[in-house]
Amino acid sequence: MDLQTITYLVVGASFALYIGIAIWARAGSTSEFYAAGGSVHPITNGMATAADWMSAASFISMAGLIANMGYGGGLFLMGWTGGYVLLAMLLAPYLRKFGKFTVPQFIGDRFYSQTASTVAVVCLLVASITYIIGQMTGVGVAFSRFLGVSSEMGIYIGMGIVFAYAVFGGMKGITYTQVAQYIVLILAYTVPAVFISLQLTGNPIPQLGLGASISGTDISLLTKLDQVVTDLGFNQYTTSVPGSTLNMFVYTMSLMIGTAGLPHVIMRFFTVAKVSDARSSAGWALIFIALLYTTAPAVAAMAKMNLHATVNTAVGLETAADGSLKVNPEVIKANADVYAPEASLVYEQRPEWMKRWEKTGLLKFEDKNGDGRIQYYNDKTKNEAAKAKAEAAGWKGNELTVNADIIVLANPEIALLPNWVIALVAAGGLAAALSTAAGLLMAISAAVSHDLVKGVFMPNISEQGELRAGKISMAVAIVIAGYLGLNPPGFAAGTVALAFGIAASSLFPAIMMGIFSKKMNKEGAIAGMLAGLAFTLIYVFAHKGIFFIKGTEFVDMIGGPNSFFGITPEAIGAIGALVNFLVAFIVDKMTKEPPEHIQAMVENVRIPRGAKAVDGAH
């Protein structure tokens, strides 16, 4: 059976499964729609949380960014896993004990203010819609390659699928759909990694294969990769950092605290019956997340090695008789010349996977020196030795452009793995994007229908009216995110990083102060959220365009790109959080203390122990 047919079958079966589960578990009440009835088992919730958490950015884009950035790409691993631990240990049990299932609800009650709740809704909507743009970018990439449609058409199809199971099923349907999606995505990520680790190192465990020697040699995989990329003018893989060390630190912090402020993950802790179950499901989720996150560095390094080996025979990998990729130990040991004329791949002899990805526009070749061969190297290098070798070889510039978002999806094709593995990866990439998109839509729906419509504008609305408002807000959010996803502000992981920065600068400080500072009043919290959000959005929009619309950038007005101590817009959220805290505490000192009953409530919330069921009435 050919690859396209297998892909249609595997992806189609996974979509049918998701929609079938949504119909089976459709929500009939607001409790089921928003919190799955509060009766989900901790292990089930842990698996759903992991799928909700590991988005297209984790599955599709993160390993690609690590492959491009090398060691510096580890900031995504540190930020996102560290942030999840922060959320699970510091925030989730307290919020669960509070008994409110949305972040704006908590902020509104804790800061005894409808205005505070409304500001929190605005922050949540901006962060969540930005996050969904990243998911839609990933959906477009996956669909455009594996279903033979354009990236735009892929986004439209993805919008329809998410709408079908998120609107009908609510949190109940989404929870059980996400369990299925986790199983699909983790198999899709780890199975190719096992195959490729075996090919390159003979070790079936990718995490161990990353530090192992290449088969038939005593040269470690990372040592060889370092040598290949530095020979070709790229930064050393195992030591490079993105920008300055300060930017890397701030970027990591922004991802970490942004994680703890993301409403769609926090909501998952209200789907279990007890506070102890919230803690337990957090632990299970961390285990499920770690399976992918510990595999990502190996996937990144091996994919980069295979990509270079595909277009340059001097790297030391070749196609075996059965069509798989295999190591040539003699070439590896000989340290062959990557600039030799015969080393570069003849374009007309390129493998089928390159032809397939070229159709998507995410892989591009331009024959700059007219020799009919592919030269893939860093033509902007500061490495004088590499520059001199390229000039001597007659190379006129880098001829291959590889979008970072294709690395994981193309990985099994680059490694010439069986067709069923390639189809499984397609289903996994789509599962990752769709599961997180559904969780985000749930957060948006709850914020609009429960916190705005019922909480502010129509307090006497019926339960059915509230459900209808939630579904309409979901539909509107899907349309907005899909439209913006057609022209995203960057790679999937880069766009998601912006969303984390927005959550970090606006919601995280308010949640932290709400739990751990009983003296923080409503004026301080509101001023802090607005200041943090405004600071971050101005910096982000200056670089990426107002509401990410290309052509509306105003970076010169803020002193040029990365003008704030060299910090990139993806990393600015941590600075926005500091602005939030600072403004909140200054305003708090200038205004009166919260009422006594609010301070007493905060004291009570800060004692998360006790496994008794919390009343979930709203």
Image (cartoon, grey):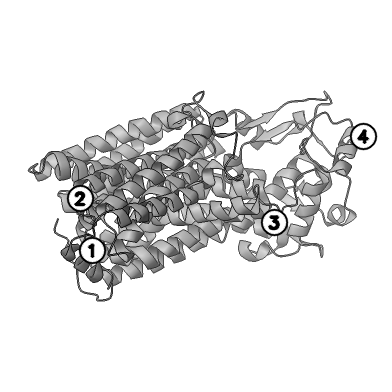
Residue 309 to residue 517: above or below: above
Q: Which residue is mark 2?
A: 113
The residue wearing badge 1 is 98
Q: Quadrant of the C terminus?
A: bottom left
Which mark, by number, is residue 199?
3
Cα gap from disc 1 to disc 3, whole angstroms: 51 Å
- Choose mark 2 or mark 1, whichever is in front: 2
- Residue flagged by tag 2: what amino acid is it? Ser
Label 2 vs label 3: CA separation? 60 Å
Q: Which x, y percent locates residue 312? A: 79, 41
Disc marking residue 537 = none
Image location of residue 184, percent across then percent down: 44, 52
Q: Earlier in the sequence, mark 4 or mark 3?
A: 3
Judge the density around disc 1: few (<14), some (14-19), many (≥20) Cα neighbours within 10 Å.
Answer: many
Which one is earlier in the sequence, the residue at label 1 or at label 3?
1
**Type of residue at label 3?**
Gln
Q: First in sequence, mark 1 or 4: give its number.
A: 1
Closer to the observer: label 1 or label 4? Answer: 1
- In terms of depth relative to the viewer, which is nearer, 566 or 171? 566
Query: Does label 2 or label 1 sit earlier along the sequence?
Result: 1
Q: Is residue 578 visible?
A: yes
530 lies left or right of 409? left
Q: Which residue position holds label 4?
A: 392
Kind of element beneath mark 1: helix
Q: Is residue 14 visible?
A: no
Callout 2 secondary element: loop
